[in-house]
Structure formats: structure tokens, C-alpha cells
Amino acid sequence: MTTLIKLEVTRALRNKKFMFFSVIYPPLLYLIIAGGADNKPIPGTQLSMPLYYMVAMAAFGAMTAVLLGNSEAIAKERAKGWVRQLRLTALPGRGYVAAKMAAAATISLPSILLVMIAAAAVKGVRLEAWQWTAILAATWLGSFAFAALGVAIGYLASGDAVRPIAMLIYFVLAFLGGLWMPLTILPQWVQNIAEWLPTHAYAALGQAVEAGGAPDVKDIALLIGYLLVFAAAAAWLYRKDARKA
């Protein structure tokens, strides 16, 4: 499984288009959105725009790497017969799914770091050492839930269908989860839905740390629950695909 993880990471690093949108684009987008913003708190929150969008764009970049990257890569591998060849090896199905998740999460780490560096160097964001560490850890570990979702989508759809399906899920979750704009400025019904979405819980982990506290137990439990559901779905779809092969 370690060999497969190394192979997946190496292949992703060679994909210039993927690296731009998953690693370079999020910090650039952060600077565009928060570039001219002041340090006044966003209405309904304790965070300024530079702080709020630091976590939001770090989460957005990680999602790009693990969700879109996984789903499209798996769909292409299925079409080319690569997955069928892997089934002939000693690698178990759960090993393949775990390797895909681990490789995608590894790629997401540079994106998270670059957004945080941009926030500190350009926007002057200053936090305690423990806060930087906790935000990095929470954002990285939280991305595993979306890595599992990416694997599931990769087995749910195939060919040309996987991209629009993945993009739709990706943008809906990002918008309703508060990654594009603070939920406090959106209608109440949107806020009510967001409370139960994985993206809201995901961003809330780091934003709670920015505010000087600990992540809410509800957000942690919600994200773990989604991880288990998405991983179970990915494993079931993998087995279903194996029976068809």
C-alpha cells in the first residue's frame, strides 16, 4: 500500500493543472478575497475577513485536492482498466481505498500551508503557535472525510459524467458550508441547512481555534460521522464495481 501511495503522490505532483488548482489557486483566491479587507469583525462572528477566509480557503484548497482529484483519477483508472489490474495483485480493496485517501490528503497539505503563509506574510495574521498548529492539524485531518467522498464519487460515476457530478457536489457543499461567504449574511434557512453539512463543520474546526477556543464537539462528531459514511459508501461501491468487472 505504501508503494501505491508514493505512486499516487508522484503522479499528482506531475499534473501541472491539478497542482495549480489544488495548491496555487487557493492562496491566490485568498489574497483576492481578503486582500483589501480590514480587520473589523464580520457581523455575527468574532473573526475578521483575513481570519475567516484563511480557514475557509485552506479548507477549499484541501477539498479541491482530495475530492475532485480522487473522483476524476479513479474514474479515469476504471476506464483504462488500471483498477482491474490492481485487483489481480495482493492489495486488498480496503488497501486501495485507504491509499487513495492517504495520497490525496498528502497533496492537500501544501495548499493548506500556502494559504496560512499568505495570511501571515501578506495580511499580517498573527496567532499563537498552538493556534497555527491546531488549525493546520484540524484542516488536514478534516480533509480525510472529503477524500473518502471523492473515492465514492469515482466509483459512483464514470467517464464524462464524473466531472460534472463531482463539481456540482463540490460547489454546493462549498457554498452552503460557508466557504465562499460568511453564513451570517445568508438567509436563515441556508444557515439551518449548513449546520448539518460536512463543509460547515470542517471550517468551524479551524475558526473556533482562531477565536481562541476549542472546536465544538458537535462539529467533530459530525465530521467523523460523515467520514464513516463516505468511507463505507466508497468501500461498498468498490466491491460493487469489482463484481461487475
Image (spheres, rainbow, N blue to C red):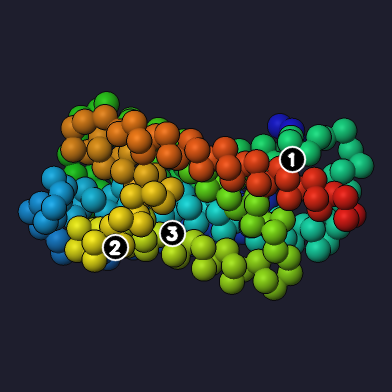
Q: Residue 55 at x, y = what percent?
A: 31, 47
User: How far apart are the alpha carbons under marks 3 and 1?
Assistant: 26 Å
Mark nearer the viewer, 3 or 1: 3
Asked which secondary structure carries label 2, the reply is helix
On screen, residue 146 versus residue 118, left or right, reads: right
Crowdedness near tag 2: few (<14), some (14–19) or many (≥20) residues, C-alpha within 10 Å: few
User: Residue 178 lies in what quarter of the image?
Assistant: bottom left
* Residue sitting nearer the eye, 244 or 99: 244
In three-dimensional space, the C-alpha distance between marks 1 and 2, rounded to whole angstroms, equals 39 Å
**Mark 3 touches mark 2? (CB < 8 Å):** no
For the residue pair 226 and 57, the one nearer the viewer reads as 226
Residue matched to label 1: 96
Q: Amino acid at mark 2?
A: Trp
User: Which label sits on residue 173?
Assistant: 3
Alpha-carbon span between mark 3 and mark 2: 15 Å
What secondary structure is found at the residue carrying circle 1? helix
Depth check, front residue: 77 or 116 = 77
Residue 172 in the figure: left or right of residue 208: right
The N terminus, quarter of image: top right
Residue 238 place in picture, x, y as percent: 76, 48
Q: Is residue 93 above or below residue 176?
A: above
Q: Which residue: 67% across, 37% down?
A: 98
**Mark closer to the chain start, 3 or 1:** 1
Q: Is residue 148 above or below residue 38?
A: above
Q: Residue at 30% of width from left, 34% of height from top?
A: 216
Decide which of 8, 92 is in the foreground and name it. Answer: 92
The amino acid type found where label 3 is placed reads Leu
Residue type indicated by callout 1? Tyr
User: What residue is disc 2 on?
Assistant: 189
* Quadrant in the picture for residue 67: bottom right
Please indicate, yes or no, whether residue 87 appears anywhere in the rendered image. Answer: yes
- The answer to which of marks 3 and 2 sits earlier in the sequence is 3
